[in-house]
Amino acid sequence: MIDLGYRCHTPPEVFGTRAESLGAEDTTWLSKIAGSGWVVLNRDAKIMERPEELAAYRAAKVHMFYLPGEATRAHLTQLVSGNLRDIITRATDRTPEVWRITNHGVERFVIKKPRSRGK
């Protein structure tokens, strides 16, 4: 991202060290970046399925962009650089949203409703 003119904050920077960032709970790092105005590039879409993590995302009030989990570093770089204008445009909206970055562009990420468990 630095090559594209933007500063990238990594988990070790947020937590102080790489060791401290490893295995950090999503609720923890989301609370650490709350109100930062940062754009989150992420590959763990399960955040949107777990109620406590979804609540932490909403409380953090950040824009989140999901990248394919299986993508290589080169592919991730290509996706971000190729869609940077759309990422920045969407990230300037006042209301935080969740997006998916694909080979076809930036698409709205649909947050699944939790299943109700029958008793």
Image (cartoon, rainbow, N blue to C red):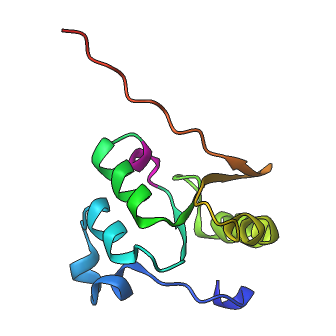
Q: Position of residue 65 (x, y in %)?
A: 59, 60
Residue drawn at x 21%, y 80% as measured from the top left: 20
Image quadrant holding the C terminus, namely: top left
Query: Is residue 82 placed above or below 70 in the rendered structure?
Result: below
Residue drawn at x 28%, y 48% as measured from the top left: 52
Judge whether residue 110 is colored magenta: no
**Stretch of the chain drawn in magenta:** 44-48
Question: Which residue is at the front of the view, 114 or 6?
Answer: 114
The quadrant holding residue 10 is bottom left
Question: Which residue is at the front of the view, 10 or 117?
Answer: 117
Q: Position of residue 64 (x, y in %)?
A: 55, 61
Q: Is residue 104 rendered to the left or right of residue 57? A: right
Residue drawn at x 28%, y 90% as measured from the top left: 16
Q: Position of residue 34 (x, y in %)?
A: 40, 73
Residue lying at the far top of the rendered structure: 119
The quadrant holding residue 83 is bottom right
The quadrant holding residue 118 is top left
Residue drawn at x 70%, y 71% as measured from the top left: 92
Q: Is residue 35 rendered to the left or right of residue 22? A: right
